[in-house]
């Protein structure tokens, strides 16, 4: 079995690669072929927005799971 740190390291790179390709495709779809290549600041801004949204989504999911666990625990107390 792979070391979990190694798995996480690869996962981060794979996610970044996926996001980069999706962002470039999306920008070029909206503004025309080659726009992303010619405007790297737009690519960077969209990648930053994607990362921020992902962090918010993961934090919200964690809080929801924690709240459910607390609710279940309190309900089982009587």
Image (spheres, grey):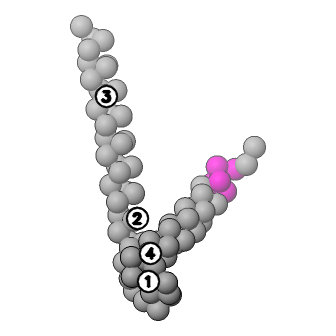
Vertical comparison of 8 with 68: above or below:
below
| Cα–Cα gap, marks 2 and 1 | 24 Å
Categorize mark 2 by other alpha carbons within 10 Å: few (<14), some (14-19), many (20+).
some
Residue 52 shows in this picture = yes
Q: Nearer the viewer, mark 3 or mark 4?
A: 4
Categorize mark 3 by other alpha carbons within 10 Å: few (<14), some (14-19), many (20+).
few
Look at the image and give the residue range highlighted in magenta: 3-7
| Cα–Cα gap, marks 3 and 2 | 26 Å
Q: Residue at x 57, y 68 (%)?
A: 17
Q: Residue at x 36, y 42 (%)?
A: 61
Query: What percent of the width, then of the height, locates residue 22?
Result: 50, 68
4 drawn magenta: yes
Q: Which of marks 1 and 3 is in front?
A: 1
Kindly identify which residue carries mark 2. 51
Q: Residue at x 64, y 49 (%)?
A: 4
Query: What percent of the width, then of the height, locates residue 20?
Result: 52, 72
Q: Earlier in the sequence, mark 3 or mark 4?
A: 4
Task: Confirm or deny contact between disc 4 and disc 2 (CB under 8 A).
Answer: no
Q: Which mark is residue 32?
A: 1
In this orientation, which residue lies closer to the viewer: 63 or 28? 28
Kindly identify which residue carries mark 4. 29
Task: Confirm or deny contact between disc 1 and disc 4 (CB under 8 A).
Answer: no
């Amino acid at each position: 079995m792979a070391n979990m740190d190694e798995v996480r390291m690869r996962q981060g790179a794979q996610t970044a690669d996926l996001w980069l390709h999706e962002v470039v495709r999306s920008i070029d779809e909206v503004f025309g072929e080659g726009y992303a290549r010619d405007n790297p600041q737009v690519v960077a801004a969209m990648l930053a927005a994607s990362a921020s949204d992902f962090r918010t989504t993961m934090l919200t999911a964690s809080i929801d799971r924690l709240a459910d666990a607390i609710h279940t625990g309190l309900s089982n107390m009587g």
